[in-house]
């Protein structure tokens, strides 16, 4: 089993709603930040670099989140990212968010690979597949 990639997020007051917990709509954004950081650190660039420098798009086709405990500004939010599934032209990431040792949320995020300038599906490029396979759980 591969080690999970982790990305820490500083949760701030501005992320919260009147109930003094993180606004629900921020949670997917935290997950996307963690996936982008994973891509940046493992592929040498996140979505922006992949799209512009490698003509590789990765639009999302599915997102699913389960909430387990509230997220607050009290502790750093540690988001872990792993590759849950590799298809021919898609990847599914599993993201978990923990604060102070407690699981706060877990989610599944599926992207399909495209030739960016044509927005046409393509198989996962071999340079990317090799990296993703190293993080398959």
Image (cartoon, rainbow, N blue to C red):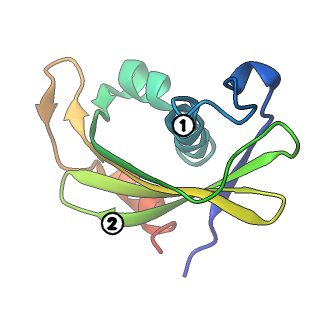
* Among the 4 quarters of the image, the one containing residue 118: top left
Quick check: 3 above or below 72?
below
- Which element is circle 1 on? helix
Find disc 2 in the rendering and name its residue: 85
- Above or below 83: residue 59: above
**Which quarter of the rendering shows the N terminus?**
bottom right
- The residue that appears at 83% across and 45% down in the rendered structure is 76
Callout 2 secondary element: strand
Residue 53 location, quadrant: top left
Q: Residue at x 32, y 54 (%)?
A: 91
Residue 22, x across and y down, in percent: 67, 34
Upstream in the sequence, badge 1 or badge 2?
1
Foreground: 66 or 108?
66
Establish if 65 lies above or below 117: below
Instruction: Give the left or right position of residue 23, taking residue 55 as reference.
Output: right
**Residue at label 1?**
36
The residue nearer to you, when weighing 132 against 99, is 99
Q: Position of residue 5 (x, y in %)?
A: 64, 58
How far is disc 1 from disc 2 in space, using C-alphas?
Answer: 17 Å
């Amino acid at each position: 089993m591969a080690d999970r990639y982790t990305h820490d997020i500083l949760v701030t007051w501005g992320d919260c709603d009147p109930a003094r917990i993180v606004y629900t709509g921020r949670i997917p954004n935290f997950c996307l930040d963690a996936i982008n950081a994973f891509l940046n650190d493992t592929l040498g660039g996140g979505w922006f670099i992949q799209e512009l420098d490698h003509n590789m798009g990765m639009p999302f086709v599915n997102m699913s989140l389960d909430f387990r405990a509230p997220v607050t500004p009290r502790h750093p939010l540690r988001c872990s990212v792993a590759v849950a599934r590799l298809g021919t032209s898609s990847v599914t990431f599993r993201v978990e968010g923990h604060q102070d040792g407690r699981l706060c949320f877990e989610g599944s995020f599926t992207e399909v690979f495209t030739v960016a300038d044509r927005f046409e599906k393509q198989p996962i490029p071999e340079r990317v597949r090799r990296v993703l396979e190293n993080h398959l759980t």
